[in-house]
Amino acid sequence: MTGASAALDGDTPADTWQRTSTPASTIGPWLPEGDLGVRLADGLARVEAALRAAVHSDHAFIADAAGHLVTAGGKRFRPLLALLAAELGDPSAPGVTEAAVVCELTHLATLYHDDVMDEAVVRRGAPSANSRWSNSIAILTGDLLFARASDLLADLGPEAVRIQARTFERLVTGQIRETVGAGPGDDPVAHYLDVLADKTGSLVATSARFGASFAGVDDALVVALTAFAEEVGVAFQLSDDLLDIVSRDGASGKSPGTDLREGIATLPALFALAGEDPAEQRLRELVSGPITDDADHAEALELLRSSTALVRATEVLEEYADRARVLLADVPEGPVREALSALCDYVVTRTS
């Protein structure tokens, strides 16, 4: 069931990882080459094997449901950041791999719940758990992954438990605020960005914090890496939101325009709704709610792709990437800093 059990004679950990997992290709271009790249691939092999072990169950149905999103692949963005941050200390130190797995399990668990709330039918190019089985099974499977993450976390010490608990509080807070929506007098754009910081940025930040902390990195540098990761985490989510519009081949892991079809107002839609250009009146009408008609959906996508709203959303994405890059000033020069800087570039260029 685990990645390790699928290894062949003569395989390196990196060989096993490449064959047993299929992370989205969108994560690849910024990864470093040379010795650092080899160490990260080996580290990801250990993470992948541990993930598969963590979702194993003696009950066949539970094993199938719990392993559904693990076997579907994914970017493994959070464990990658944990392993990369750990490279500034001792990446082989106890707790590094386990902490990376905890963050990915937490992320996967939230996806099961998100798909229920969004009534999604596809996740990572495969049927979502809720559409394959039911909402109840998807919710319970997400709960199971949270339990497995907590079990691993218990061995990492009370401080790690506290950090994860506070991270999870932010995740839930962000989800509640997104569900309720902006209040009277609130700026919808500011509200949306705050939600992204809680829902996405918090766990990405904790991933880097865990990796660096367990690797014995200096406290001041841990703080800088945590702040960097939160900014780049929001940027990565913003780039996913833009990909949902500009991608014509489902590179975001969803069918293009899924957010529009479901009436989810991401940053480009929010800017469109706030616009006053008479030439974009039709766009404002279309994005004001869910789009069920296929012709209207196609029209909205094309209008958004050439809109000033998309330009403004891209500028906000660039601002987050720039802020993240500034925070790298405290990271020692070398391959790790170069890789993190390349990530800042990548979160912008992947949408162009």
Image (cartoon, helix red, strand yellow):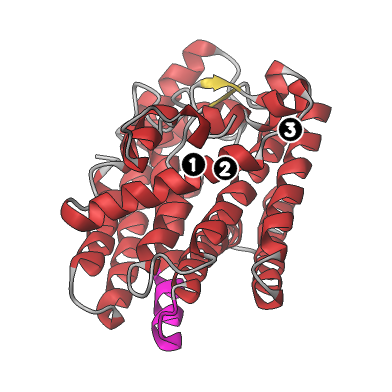
Using the image, tell me which numbered label, if any, was put on residue 326. none
Looking at the rendered structure, the secondary structure element under dot 3 is: loop
Main secondary structure found in the magenta portion = helix
Label 3 Cα crowd, 10 Å radius (few <14 / some 14-19 / many 20+): some
Where residue 21 sits in the image (x, y, percent)? 44, 32
In the picture provided, is 117 more to the left or to the right than 196?
A: right
Label 1 Cα crowd, 10 Å radius (few <14 / some 14-19 / many 20+): many
Residue type (three-letter) at the residue carrying disc 3: Ser
Looking at the rendered structure, the secondary structure element under dot 1 is: helix
* Magenta span includes 224: yes
Where residue 82 sits in the image (x, y, percent)? 44, 61
User: Which region shows up in magenta?
Assistant: 216-228
Label 2 Cα crowd, 10 Å radius (few <14 / some 14-19 / many 20+): many
Residue type (three-letter) at the residue carrying disc 2: Leu
Q: Is residue 275 in view from this perspective? A: no
In the picture provided, is 62 more to the left or to the right than 33?
A: right
Q: Is residue 187 above or below residue 60?
A: below
Residue located 39% across and 27% down the image: 8
Contact between marks 2 and 1 (CB within 8 A): the answer is: yes
Q: Which residue is mark 1?
A: 48
Q: Which residue is mark 2?
A: 51
Quarter of the N terminus within the rendering: top right
Q: CA distance from mark 3 to mark 2?
A: 12 Å
